[in-house]
Amino acid sequence: MPRYLNPPTAPKPASRYSQAVACGAAYKRVVVSGQIGVDAAGQLAEGLEAQMGQAFDNLLAIVAAAGLGASDIVKISCFVTQSGSVATFRRVREAKLGAVAPACTYLEVAGLADPAYLVEVEGEALQEAGPGR
């Protein structure tokens, strides 16, 4: 089982995330490419919060397709083109992940692959390897 680390010798996380996640060797690992606010039909959501929610939905759908769930996510990175959006990110992340507190990085960037894209979310999930996994 992953160990979520927030040692007293490091700063306390500013919101629901962990400073690190330590895992043993017997894990199924899924690394998910950056997801944008486009749904399966190719429609781009309108506005930052809607795009962020869709990007998280896409990430969760890919994790689920690999046989894992939100509780298996151990790392999230979020790239946002609108400065000052960390509160929106925290709100959406907590709505989509609930009590899960993966390691997390939030970055404000000058742009993404298309100017219409306001956010990109990538992640990593781990699950203990076992028979049939």
Image (spheres, rainbow, N blue to C red):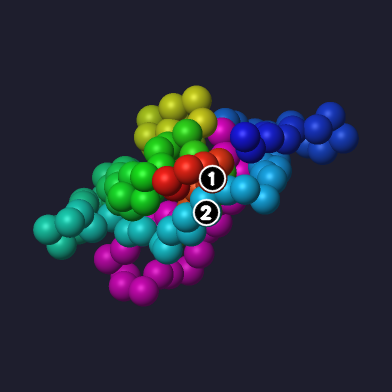
- Please state if 49 lies on the left or on the right of 133 as rendered: left
- Whether the magenta-drawn stretch holds residue 115 is answered as yes
Q: Is residue 48 in sight in this rendering?
A: no
- Please state if 30 lies on the left or on the right of 2 as rendered: left
- The location of residue 3, given as percent across then percent down, is 68, 35
- The location of residue 13, given as percent across then percent down, is 68, 34
Residue type beneath disc 2: Arg
> Which segment is the magenta one?
101-122
Q: Is residue 112 in sight in this rendering?
A: yes
Give me the disc on residue 108: none
Residue carrying label 1: 129
Mark 1 residue element: loop
Q: Residue at x 48, y 58 (%)?
A: 31
Toward the top, the furthest residue is: 99
**Figure check: 68 above or below 83:** above
Give me the disc on residue 29: 2
Mark found first going from the N terminus, 2 or 1? 2
- The location of residue 108, given as percent across then percent down, is 52, 58
Q: Residue at x 15, y 62 (%)?
A: 42
Which mark is in front, 2 or 1?
A: 1
- Whether the magenta-drawn stretch holds residue 99 is answered as no
Q: Residue at x 42, y 37 (%)?
A: 70
Q: How many marks?
A: 2
Distance CA(mark 2)–CA(mark 1): 9 Å
Q: Give the quarter of the figure containing the N terminus.
A: top right
Residue type beneath disc 1: Ala
Toward the right, the furthest residue is: 9
Toward the bottom, the furthest residue is: 113
Residue placed most toward the observer, 88 or 43: 43
- Please state if 55 lies on the left or on the right of 93 as rendered: left
Residue placed most toward the observer, 68 or 9: 68
